[in-house]
Amino acid sequence: MLKTFLTRSCQALLFSGLLACTHTAPKEQAHPMSEQTPANPAFEAYSARFLEALWELEPDWALQVGYFKHLDKVKIPDAAYRKRVIQFTEEQLQALKQLDKATLSRSQQVDAQLIENFLEASRWSLEKEQSYAWNPAQYNISPSIARLFEPNALSQEQRLRTALLYFKQARPYYAAAKAAIKDPTLEHTRLALTQHQGLSAEWQRTYLSNAKKSALSKQEKAAFQRELNNAVAAVDDYRSFLKTLEKRLVKGPARSFRLAPELYRQKFAYELGASLSADEVYAKALEARERTLARMDELAQKLYPTYLPGQALASEPKQRIRAVLNVLAQQHPDASRFRETIAAQIPELERFVREKDLVYLDPSKPLKVRDTPIYARGVAGASVDAPGPYAKGGETFYNVTPIAGESRETIASYLREYNNFTLQILNIHEAIPGHYTQLVHSNESPSLIKSILGNSTMIEGWAVYSERMMLEEGYGAQSPELWLMYDKWHMRVILNTILDYEVHIKGLSAEAGLTMLTNDGFQERAEAEEKWKRATLTQVQLASYFTGYSELYALRNELKSLEAKEFSLRRFHDRFLSYGSAPVKYIRELMLAEPSH
């Protein structure tokens, strides 16, 4: 429950995890965070106690960030657990009040604020938002089990014995889930069905095979198969429960997926940690939409004679833009090699970043491209799944959801959307120097709190900022085609914020939302429908991209102006990333207060 406030990246990063190994820092300082005020030992001791208590309460989350002390515990999400969460937040808030914040270093003051916000947000979630009662998709034991069997510091026998504990607790886990769900939405019920589809077969195929080949005793292997079968039965029972719910909700009435306006504004403040309110960010997004449309029209007019030779220039700006985009979108990868095309671009991006000396890249931490695991599907088509700060040597995965099995029309639409141009922007965002790079740096932050209590606005803001920064620094050789597709992509970021706000604050209809995405955003119908679906399943997260980008881009320009000729883009990036995943507004305070070199 507490973990719902750790939005480390695109939605799939709620399942981040694992692998502990040693890391040798390079001779070049990659994380030049300075500290003018000495750290307060009392606060460091409190932070350690806070984290230990958090991991005991949240063993699944601990496992996902690579902290293995509580492998013998499995969280049961029942009323007693929710009571313990409230007690935990009250006790920790009281402990925070006992600390004299004036004696803390600047970095520690930020940590204290992050902890306080996290605790208040957790309490708010249980008492006000109450998603435990209306979101069946938040109940799933599969992510933690899957993490056990990815490369980590555990032996095969430790993984299997821990998995056995999860299998033993599957029945009470899903019984608690069914008891908690009182007023579900149809949309979240269907997402839960999607994410539990095929789990039974996958468990039987993967985990039972591992157990049979392991060094477990004959008795342990028999117990493993018995409890796995019981867990499969519990999952199947939960799916039957969800199917029954779905049938009832289709007939209606069903709870709306929309948050009440006041709840949305409160969640925006808690989760995004922005310097502006939801209403202020929405107003900025409306202005950005008009500026971006004007810039796209200039580029479209420039490219029109090349791609539409002999045709009269369309009279309306959006017609001109769409005409050129439609031609460019025909240049796309083959459906059968979509994931391979993504994987092939990663070394090219890495090479460009190194040649331009834009940000430190750790050569000891490779990125692996894979199909999105079943338990993480249904929200985003691409995402990065990164290890936590206790497992900084772990593998980072670039998840790509397979498109095979979709209709021919859907696949064609998807490939036009993710054409040869936008696919490069996507890879910058998700991989290098976007999410993958940022999360590697975050794990090396001197502050565990800043890494663990990650802020989605900073994380998404960095990824969006990276897109523009790369093109500004010459990636793509200033190709007007790539810049036009970048603007289309950036329009998506802007419309994410507008869509999210208008869905929850203004009650935007599906028809109006899809029209906005396809008309103002020039999105393919399939992409627009997926974005609408995402807007019905998440709240606030879609606004994090534009919010974080705007704050980060403004900060860079502010420091560039202050430092003038002394400004170094590489130094700015490394310093910015050294503060874990703290909100941009706090990083700004720290960077302005501390010397840059």
Image (cartoon, rainbow, N blue to C red):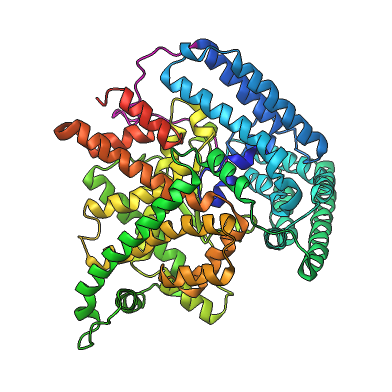
Q: How many marks?
A: 0
In the picture shown, does residue 186 fall above or below 386? below
Q: Quadrant of the N terminus?
A: top right
Q: Nearer the viewer, residue 548 or 206?
A: 548
Spot the residue most to the left.
565
Residue 182 belongs to the span the image colors magenta:
no
Q: Which residues are magenta?
A: 16-40
Residue 11 in percent (x, y) is at 55, 51
Taking 348 as reference, is 85 left or right? right
> Within the image, what quadrant is residue 197 found in?
bottom right
> Can see residue 578?
no
Q: Quadrant of residue 421?
A: bottom left
Residue 242 position, x and y percent, is 79, 61
Q: Position of residue 530 (x, y in %)?
A: 55, 66
Q: Position of residue 14 (x, y in %)?
A: 58, 46
- Residue at left 40%, top 39%? 364
| 6 lies above or below 504 | above
Q: Can you say whether 120 is above or below 518 in the image? A: above
Q: Is residue 32 on the magenta stretch?
A: yes
Can residue 219 be seen at all in this image of the molecule?
Answer: yes
Position of 325 with respect to 135 (left or right) is: left
The correct choice, above or below, for 115 with respect to 489 in the image is above
Q: Main secondary structure of the magenta part?
A: loop
160 horizontally vs 308: left or right: right
| Quarter the C terminus occupies | top left
For the point 30% across and 56% down, the residue is: 348
Q: Residue at x 51, y 37 (%)?
A: 454
Residue furthest out toward the bottom:
310
